[in-house]
Image (cartoon, rainbow, N blue to C red):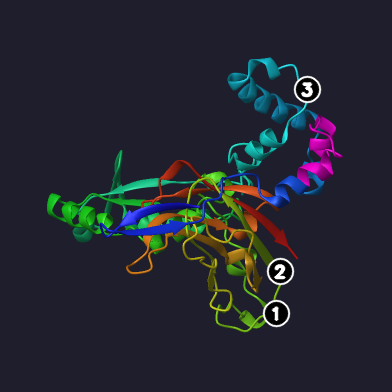
Amino acid sequence: MGSYKYCICFTRKFVWRAAAPPPDVRQTFVEYSEGAAQMGPDQLRRFLAEAQGQAEATLADAERIIEVLRRRRCHHLPAMLSRPGITLDDFFHFLFSDDLNPPIRSQVGAALPQHPKRTLWSMLIRTNVVCFSHTFEMIKCLRSIKEFAFCASPYPVVITLEDHLTPDLQAKVAESLWQGYGRSLWLMQGLFRANGGCGYVRKPDFLMNIGPRAAVFEPEARLPVKITLKVTDAHPTTLFTDFQVGIAGVPADIKMKRTRIKQDDWMPVWGEEFSFPLTVPELALLRIEAHEYNMSDMDDFGGQTCLPVWELKPGIRAVPLHDHKGNKYKSVRLLMRFQFV
């Protein structure tokens, strides 16, 4: 039990609970270490394959992770370098590392398109001329793109048109960008974390192909549930008393939920499970927001992130949070469990 003074003469008491591995992490460690004090490479490989859904994990992968954790441990306790396995604290550190245990795939998984680049000057409005080494008529560029750009590959052609604005228009654009931080930007940042964050995300086939009788995708249509995403919030690296998790996507999938609040308790209720039935998981983004709960005023913003659902890795994962501009915090993460059923 702790306390602090507020309004000069009043004292408020709160319950303090020290940060420690949550029960499900302890239980998982005991299960895969077979009750021993340390977990060896083969046991860690089995954990990666069975609990984390990494069926391709090899013994060499497990040994590499253990070596990284041992080097961290010996930096603090050199005498423990000779121990071959990892302890519960090492295991907890591994789970909380977004480098060793990221929530989404980090490799590029789609072929990149060709990216022709042309520079447009303000005279384009009057002359329809593209300036790039030498001049081309705009209409010739468009006709060439139509005739040749979509023959060699089924992937889209990305064309960047740079409009060199006059200084007064540049100032207006800069002003609009400065005012653009918010949830809409967070969603776009989350979308482009897919495919290794390379900047290219291929559209799902149903958005690129026409169905029977020239049918196109209708986001408002009532569709059956394809998959259910279960999210369990396990533990934070820093203190947030209000935690929200939800889905952005087609109207039928949009939902936002929050953890229960316990008054006069320094920690929120962790370990809650949220279920999200998804009709179009290919377009769904997992939204996560953390706030400092304030009973008498607006909650203070703590951190946020958005993750593409189709790239989430199952199991217990470290989810880094970002500020309102999208910059990643250095040491603010959430430990979450993802399941697809």
| Marks 1 and 2, how far apart at CA | 9 Å
Q: Is residue 269 magenta?
A: no
Task: Identify the residue under disc 3.
Answer: 84
Q: Nearer the viewer, residue 240 or 267?
A: 267
Residue 107 is at least partly visible in this image:
no
Between marks 3 and 1 in the image, the one whose residue lies nearer the viewer: 3
Q: Position of residue 311 (x, y in %)?
A: 63, 54
| Residue under the point 39% across and 45% down | 117
Q: What residue type is disc 1 on?
A: Pro
Q: Residue furthest right?
A: 34
Looking at the rendered structure, the secondary structure element under dot 1 is loop
Looking at the rendered structure, the secondary structure element under dot 2 is strand
Q: Is residue 282 above or below residue 82?
A: below
Bin the neighbour count of mark 2 within 10 Å (Cα to Cα): few under 14, some 14-19, many 20 and up: some
Looking at the rendered structure, the secondary structure element under dot 3 is loop
Q: What residue type is disc 2 on?
A: Ile
Q: Position of residue 127 (x, y in %)?
A: 21, 57
Task: Identify the residue under disc 1.
Answer: 224
Task: Identify the residue under disc 2.
Answer: 227
Between marks 2 and 3 in the image, the one whose residue lies nearer the viewer: 3
- Per the rendered image, the range of residues in magenta is 28-46
Q: Is residue 207 above or below residue 314?
A: below
Q: Nearer the viewer, residue 87 or 340?
A: 87
Q: What residue type is disc 3 on?
A: Pro
Dot placed on the residue nearer the N-terminal end, 3 or 1: 3
Q: Position of residue 94 (x, y in %)?
A: 65, 37
Bin the neighbour count of mark 1 within 10 Å (Cα to Cα): few under 14, some 14-19, many 20 and up: few
| Residue under the point 61% across and 63% down | 204
